[in-house]
Image (spheres, grey):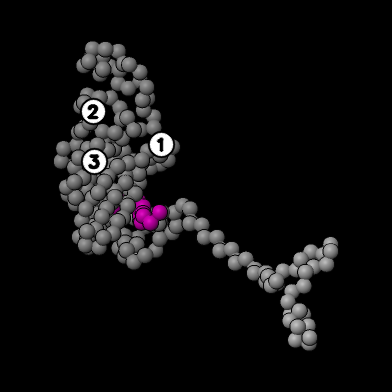
Amino acid sequence: MADEQKKDEAQPQPPAAGEAPKPAVEEKKVAPPPKPAAPAKPSVGPEPLDNELVRRLRARFGTALGDATLDRKQAIVVVRERLLEVCEYLKTEEKFDFLADLTAVDWFDRQPRFDVILNLYSFPHNQRLRLKATVGDTCASVTGVWPAANWLERECYDMFGIRFEGHPNLKRILLPDEWKGYPLRKDYDILKQDTDWIRENIGIESGQ
């Protein structure tokens, strides 16, 4: 009888009337894992740049250079004067042997009015550099440094009217030689175009 009584005590007893059943095993509450920290926001806008290349340029050209910045991983150096000397140094000493592009920006209300933009690449160092030369209506030609500048400077002249001093054959490359005005200048009336040229050479009134 004693053994049977112990077996009965060991077995779970049904709940009394009106009483909620108890769980066989009490559940342990586990705290949720901590939320991961929010990723750091990338910096917006250009940051000052002072790497070895910039220090060598400043040591050689001093106040001829303006700001040096890093914008979206692109190194940018402003050149106020002595552009041709800076370019010759960058090609021969720093091995920027490829002129990838040359264009301009018209700031209109600013003096000097234009930025001539040169995008350079060094094959030996796998490095890119952007030069911003602040100029008025004239700029030194870099065709003697990078022959690829020939047609790029002609296009820049054709669109912005910037005269590249020392260019071997500076004339329009996209528009007719007799075209009046420079379409990418901020003060060019794109709706008017050159109505006289259209009338004289095509025989129609401008469609604008």
Q: Position of residue 122 (x, y in %)?
A: 24, 58
Secondary structure, mark 2, is loop
Which residue ends up furthest to the front in the rendered image?
1
Q: Which residue is mark 2?
A: 175
Secondary structure, mark 3, is helix
For residue 186, side relative to residue 178 (left or right):
right
Which amino acid is tagged 1?
Answer: Phe
Q: Which residues are drawn in magenta? A: 72-82
Which amino acid is tagged 3?
Answer: Glu
Which amino acid is tagged 2?
Answer: Leu
Please report whichever mark, 2 or 3, sits nearer to the chain's N-terminal start. 3
Dot 2 and dot 3 residues touching (CB under 8 Å): no
User: Which label is found at residue 153?
Assistant: 3
Q: Find out whether residue 65 is within the magenta segment.
A: no
| Residue 155 position (above or below residue 26) | above
For residue 125, side relative to residue 37 (left or right):
left
In this view, the residue in front, 52 or 113, is 52
Q: Quadrant of residue 76?
A: bottom left
Q: Residues within 10 Å of mark 3 (few under 14, many from 20)?
A: many
Q: Quadrant of residue 152?
A: top left
Can residue 94 be spotted in the picture?
no
Measuring 68% from the left and 70% from the top, which residue is drawn there? 27
Can residue 52 be spotted in the picture?
yes
User: Which label is found at residue 108?
Assistant: 1
Measuring 74% from the left and 74% from the top, which residue is drawn there? 12
